[in-house]
């Protein structure tokens, strides 16, 4: 019985194996399914009318002016240039304390009468004064500042009310040498004395406003000392 079923299975497998082939024939290559080929469509050239329209559009773009917006770096350079020019103009005027005094212009509206003026703000008190009152206000402010800091007040007086800037420069250099000698040679008594009749002192220091107050502020005293042989 088992042999009968094995023969039936072998017969079915043989029938489903496909068409027959002789042993002398070469093996057949598997057939490939034909593939559909897509041929690219030829690109249609633009018409003459479309070409003329494109050329006209390009011509309009080339003729259109291109505005150049200022970059942030250019704006910064312009601002720095303005500030440097303002500083140069102030240094040419030779201003000292007055450099800190700001000028303000106040103009009335169009409905009211147009009145403009130049006012100055005192850097010590904040008072707003006219030009003809400026020096008086500065003197009063510096004089009042002596009670707060006499050394700083005397320095402001020297730099503010002596208009010859070269004389002020020489005066400050000479006073600095006096103080340097005292600091570097504290044991030398001669450096702690300044003869008021000394030619250098008379020509460079004594002739300027505020110098005697400066020496008093740093500790000097005016005394009459005996001169040997007189």
Image (cartoon, rainbow, N blue to C red):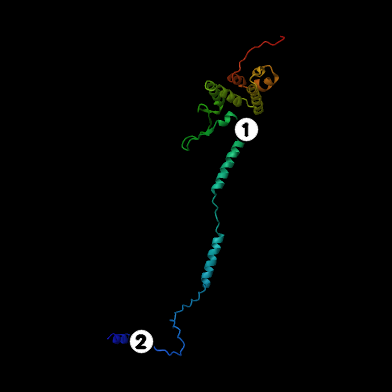
* Residue that numbered label 1 is attached to: 93
User: Is residue 37 rendered to the left or right of residue 177?
Assistant: left
- Mark 1, Cα crowd under 10 Å, few <14 / some 14-19 / many 20+, is few
Residue depth check, mark 1 versus mark 2: number of the one nearer the observer: 2
Where is residue 160 shown, x and y percent of the image? 59, 26
Instruction: Kindly indicate the quadrant of the structure image that contains residue 205.
Output: top right
Q: Is residue 188 above or below residue 32?
A: above
- Could you say which is closer to the camera, residue 57 or residue 156? 156
Residue at the location (55% across, 66% down)? Answer: 55
Give SS at disc 2: helix
Where is residue 198 shown, x and y percent of the image? 69, 18
Where is residue 145 shown, x and y percent of the image? 53, 23
- Could you say which is closer to the camera, residue 148 or residue 66? 148
- Could you say which is closer to the camera, residue 50 or residue 145? 145
Where is residue 60 shown, x and y percent of the image? 54, 62
Q: Earlier in the sequence, mark 1 or mark 2?
A: 2
Q: Is residue 199 above or below residue 111?
A: above
* Residue that numbered label 2 is attached to: 14
User: Is residue 36 rendered to the left or right of residue 130?
Assistant: left
Residue at the location (60% across, 29% down)? Answer: 96
């Amino acid at each position: 019985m088992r042999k009968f079923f094995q023969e039936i299975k072998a017969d079915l497998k043989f029938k489903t194996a496909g068409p027959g082939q002789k042993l002398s024939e070469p093996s057949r290559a598997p057939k490939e399914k034909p593939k559909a080929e897509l041929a690219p469509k030829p690109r249609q050239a633009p018409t003459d009318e479309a070409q003329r329209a494109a050329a006209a559009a390009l011509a309009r773009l080339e003729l259109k002016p291109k505005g150049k917006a200022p970059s942030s770096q250019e704006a910064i350079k312009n601002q720095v240039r303005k500030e440097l020019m303002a500083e140069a103009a102030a240094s040419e005027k030779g201003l000292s304390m007055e450099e800190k005094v700001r000028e303000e212009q106040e103009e009335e509206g169009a409905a009211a009468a147009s009145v403009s003026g130049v006012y100055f703000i005192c850097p010590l008190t904040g008072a707003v004064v006219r030009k003809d009152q400026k020096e008086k206000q500065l003197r009063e402010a510096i004089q009042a500042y002596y009670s707060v800091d006499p050394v700083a007040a005397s320095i402001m007086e020297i730099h503010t009310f002596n208009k010859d800037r070269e004389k002020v420069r020489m005066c400050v250099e000479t006073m600095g040498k006096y103080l340097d000698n005292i600091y570097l040679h504290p044991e030398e008594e001669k450096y702690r004395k300044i003869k008021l009749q000394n030619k250098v002192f008379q020509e460079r220091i004594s002739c300027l406003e505020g110098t005697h107050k400066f020496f008093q502020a740093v500790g000097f005293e005016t005394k009459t000392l005996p001169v040997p042989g007189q």
